[in-house]
Amino acid sequence: MKKLVLSLKWLNILLSFGVIYFALKQLNGFYHFVVNNQSKREIFLGIKIPDDVNHSFYIIASILSFTLLIYLFYLLNIFRKTTRDLSNNLIFNEENGIQLFKIGKGLLVFGIILLIFKITISIVFYYKPFEDVSKTLTYEFGYALGFTMSNLFLFIVSVGFPIFIVSLFLMIISQLIKQGHYLKQENDLTI
């Protein structure tokens, strides 16, 4: 159990450094955009902003992404507290179940916000209407839907799906820990 807890602590440290790296990269890109008016316009996790986008939208998107990174760091801090309880051999603790459920729900919200952000960028900025008038509105709508769905499918498979799987797994584990706490209390009462 000690080796597992130690590996969880190191994983948490590595993930925290990764989030800090992405936050600093985001701040650096935002600084170069505001001061030098130059940037690649990449938010994070592969979501790219086109170059012809309004500056105010890019600023709002940068602030939103930085806020999401701070939220992810907060979830990692909760996970750090849970691993500390595990190292003290407090496995079936109700607080651990609540914290793991909070982390799972937070990752689910994080994934949904990323998904909404990607859908919005894909529909609003990457879809260009046809110039040819002979194409019908239905054809244009079908093309836009196909384009959006293909981008969305690639994003879900590469980024969204692992986040949703981990969040659901953490919520299931939290329910098991809560049940274990209840069974431990029942066992302590019978002895």
Image: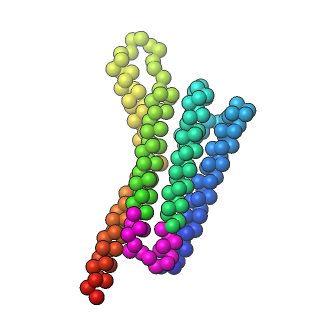
**Residue with the most extreme top position:** 133
Q: Quadrant of residue 16?
A: bottom right
Which of the image's four quarters has the C terminus?
bottom left
Residue name at image x 39 percent, y 31 percent: 146
Query: Residue 127, percent across and down?
Result: 47, 26
Residue name at image x 39 percent, y 21 percent: 140
Q: Quadrant of residue 142?
A: top left
Whether residue 61 is visible, yes or no, is yes
Q: Quadrant of residue 51?
A: top right
Whether residue 4 is visible, yes or no, is no
Query: Residue 43, percent across and down?
Result: 58, 40
Left or right: 52 as drawn, with respect to 170: right
Q: Main secondary structure of the magenta part?
A: helix
Question: Between 135 and 76, which is closer to the camera in this rendering?
Answer: 76
Residue 162 part of the magenta segment: no
Question: Between 96 and 123, which is closer to the camera in this rendering?
Answer: 96
Residue name at image x 47 percent, y 38 percent: 117
**Vertically, is 151 above or below 86?**
above
**Vertically, is 147 above or below 98?**
above
Query: Residue 44, percent across and down?
Result: 57, 44
Residue 96 part of the magenta segment: yes
Query: Residue 67, percent across and down?
Result: 55, 45
Left or right: 67 as drawn, with respect to 188: right
Tell me where the magenta segment starts and ends, as one range. Answer: 82-98
**Residue with the most extreme bottom position:** 191
Q: How many marks?
A: 0
- For the rendered model, the colour scheme is rainbow
